[in-house]
Amino acid sequence: MTKRSKKTMPDIVAEHPLFVGTSPDAQALIAGCTQNVRFRPDQMLLREGDPADVFYLIKEGRVAIEVDTPRRGPMTVETLGPGDVVGVWWLLPPYRSTFVARAVTPTGAIAVDAACLRGKCDDDPVFGFDMFKRFAGVVRDRLQAARLQLLDVDGNDAS
């Protein structure tokens, strides 16, 4: 019988699509701010307006990103799954969540303490700039997804 090796947190961080290509030192910095978490269906990961003091690397399950609309109430703008990131505003002042994130299915994730990671970004500007570039791409993709969703809701052509 072969003994299965247990992955370390730096290994898990290194395999996440957002952090592929980061140095082992960077992976260790990130991993030092992490813990495993689980969410039940309908459980909130983030609430709009709350401090952005954590973000999540989804390992399994589905998470809906929602915005509250005056006419329709909560509207899902995107559903995220394994390999995605939930909570992108941790890096930019005023460090507040701008969307609601709710587990749709049982969800396993890595919770990253944002204050811890911001401190490491401040201490190492090269590392901080790399984190900023990586998360700027996620923000761009989320804004584009939200735009397309809103166009679809309004019945406009997205082209």
Image (cartoon, rainbow, N blue to C red):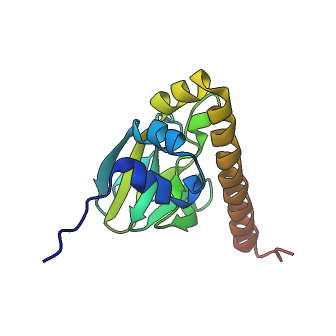
> Residue visible at 56% across and 34% down?
96
The image quadrant of residue 94 is top right
> Residue visible at 76% across and 76% down?
155
Q: Is residue 16 above or below residue 127?
A: below
Q: Tell me, yes or no, if residue 6 can be seen here.
A: yes
Observer-nearest residue: 42 or 4? 4
Q: Position of residue 13 (x, y in %)?
A: 45, 52
Q: Tell me, yes or no, if residue 67 can be seen here.
A: no
Q: Is residue 81 above or below residue 71?
A: below
The image quadrant of residue 149 is bottom right
Q: Position of residue 42 (x, y in %)?
A: 35, 61
Q: Residue furthest top?
A: 123
Q: Is residue 134 left or right of residue 12?
A: right
**Quarter of the image that includes the N terminus:** bottom left
> Residue visible at 45% across and 50% down?
56
Observer-nearest residue: 103 or 150? 103
Q: Position of residue 44 (x, y in %)?
A: 38, 51
